[in-house]
Image (cartoon, grey):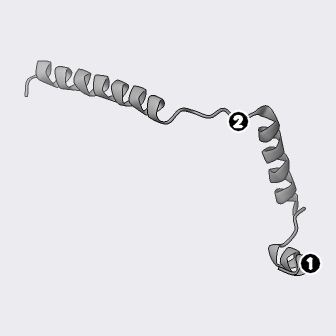
Amino acid sequence: MTEVSLVTVYNEIVEVKRKLDTIEDLIIPGEEIPKEELEEIEQFKKESLKGEHVRWDELKKELSL
């Protein structure tokens, strides 16, 4: 292949990628996570890392599940 044809193929690939990204955004719209939810997730993460959690087995036994 000549250098010109490689550049042409590359440009076409870039254009196809751009179009696919646009289609993906239309099909799968992004969902923004509210600030409150992010803060709640961060709090759960901190609690988990500190070991502040309830074991599932203990909770089931406590709730008679």
Please say if 22 is above or below 57: above
| Numbered disc total | 2
Residue 52 is marked as: none
Q: For this view, does 39 lie left or right of residue 6?
A: right
Rendered location of residue 13, percent (x, y) = 26, 28
Q: Secondary structure at mark 1?
A: helix
Q: In the drawing, does residue 60 fall left or right of residue 20?
A: right
* Residue 38 at x, y percent in the picture: 77, 39
Q: Residue at x 36, y 30 (%)?
A: 20
In the rendered image, which quarter contains the N terminus? top left
- Identify the residue position indicated by label 1 in the image: 62
Quadrant of res 24? top left
Residue type highlighted by circle 2: Ile
Q: Going 90% across and 62% down the picture, which residue do you hit?
A: 52
Q: Check disc 1 and give the amino acid type.
A: Glu
In the displayed orientation, state which residue is furthest to the top: 4
Name the residue tied to disc 2. 33
Query: Residue 34: where, in percent of width, then height?
Result: 75, 33
Residue drawn at the location 53% of the way across and 32% of the way down:
29
